[in-house]
Amino acid sequence: MKQSTFDFIIVGAGSAGAVLANRLATSGEHSVCVLEAGPEDKTPMITIPGAFSYFMFSKKYNWNYNAKPVADIREGQPLFVPRGKTLGGSSATNAMLYVRGQKEDYDHWESLGNPGWSFDEILPYFKKAETNSRGACELHGDSGPLQVTDRPVHYPISEVFIKGAEQAGFQRTDDFNGHSQEGAGYYQCTIKGGQRCGVSRGYLKPARQRSNLTVITLAQVTRVVIEEGQATGIEFVKQGKTQIIHAKKEVLLSGGSINSPQLLMLSGIGDKTQLDRHNIRCKLHLPGVGLNLRDHADACVLVHSKKRDGFTSSISGLLRMLPDTLNYIFNKKGKLANSILESGAFLKSNPDIATPDIQLHMVPLLFDDNGRDLKLMRNHGYSCHVCVLRPESTGSVTLESSNPLDKPIIDFNFFSHPADQKILVDGIKQVRKILAAPAFDEYRGEEFYPGSEVQTDEELFAKAKSRLGTVFHPVGTCKMGNDESAVVDHQLKVHGIKNLRVIDASIMPTLISGNTNAPTIAIAEKAADMILESC
């Protein structure tokens, strides 16, 4: 490696890091280095939207974390925590849904003591990032790197779901990112021309043409170099060789809500008691590092289908996909050109709620265990998944050891707050109401999970936990704020350390009401402006 000093060093080339790389390198005035632990994103599986479930099995492109086992969740089996490990991060491996959350989410952040983070102040960054196929308007942009598009509908059950929701008394919406999120409708996706448009394609690849941007893959960062209370560089391992590179201006951590707090702790920034336990010299006692972990706990309702127009992993089901496979190879069209998550809803778990507090994902197959239960998927059926949008329960990310190659301990601590349990159970009841609507009459077979015999709140909650999953939206472990548990301030600077910022979903003080990829991109867009203004 010829160059060892850069103006900015970015750790992680995911949904935040790739955005930062593009924006900070644009003027040509600053030298920028991005380090990514994973490989180049060269597999065609990344570009094929319908192949995203492949990454649930990949060891090359996925960190493959597991959460701390809990006896009454999934019968004691650990929850799987997939995170993208390649250029583009989780934007290269996710289901591509474009959701921003609710205005109230961001206004709440500001009310917690984070000036500049209200919805009206972050909206320009959502618009700056986006090219929406519907064109520009008050809420959408048409000239950003991220392509956001309406998708063709390939599975009839998707429209059946929306009609069923209307029959059950819920409204239909044509834009989950409009003035009101509430209702059932179709998701827009980050897809262009039948191919995934994650941050690698949208931001990083165009930026790599610039001579002032260096991208290093397969580089495992092991610590931030801190001298006299200031971040001066990072240490990393590549091909078994330990190297150090230096930052003249700032070190920017964009590893995500699992890796960023782990790296801070490995660097001596965190709770002193925990660091002492692992013989790590404490350079700054910052007890909030790794705390405030939040994610969308996800429960499912599984129903056998009388019709056979969904997806199955059986031999006959895969054979039926052959025409679509050829259509994709030659035309970039068909089912493989789409996310299989076509429709969903944002609803209130009960009428007294001010804004939607549950999100539904309708899937034209029997889906459990992150799509890894292939035996279940051989059968004809459909699934509706419900998650608690704004959980009160918080968990933690802590160190297993001082070895940077050891995976951290992830403890979601789900349902430690009783409100989350009630919302999840009430959400399942809302799902059942929709699936019982006349629109489903031609499809509805047996509800085999939770099962029609399961009716009481206690029974529903127990069943929900036995197949519990997440929607892969971990946030909050380096939360923004000014209280004693905050890790970064409103400019995302780490409290007590100069020239070090965390810029990713871990800075969210609370979880937004929806998918987290678009908000993470907007956070990075705003952070890039703050950094450049301070230069």
Image: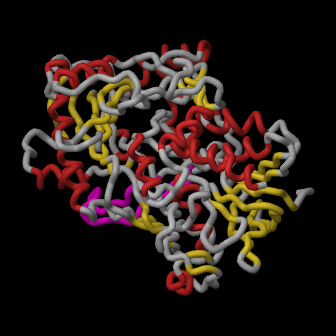
**x 16%, y 40%: residue:** 429
Image-quadrant location for residue 194: top right
- Between 298 and 127, the residue placed more toward the observer is 127
> What's the residue at 57%, 64% (across, down)?
488
Give the extent of the magenta segment: 61-81
Q: Is residue 79 above or below residue 201?
A: below
**Residue that protrudes farthest toward the right in the picture:** 2
Instruction: From the viewer's perspective, tell me whether residue 245 is left or right of residue 403.
Output: right
Which quadrant does the N terminus fall into? bottom right
Colouring method of the image: secondary structure
Instruction: Looking at the picture, tell me which residue is in the foreground, 89 or 333.
Output: 89
- As for residue 511 lying within the magenta part, the answer is no
Above or below, comparing residue 363 to residue 283 in the picture: above
In the rendered image, residue 197, in percent from the top left (x then y), is placed at 60, 30
Q: Position of residue 251 (x, y in %)?
A: 72, 61
The answer to which quarter of the image holds residue 436 is top left
The verdict on residue 78 being magenta is: yes
Q: Residue at x 18, y 17 (%)?
A: 442
Q: Camera-side residue: 389 or 299?
A: 389
Give the image location of residue 303, x and y in percent.
21, 32
Residue beneath the point at 57% across and 69% down:
406
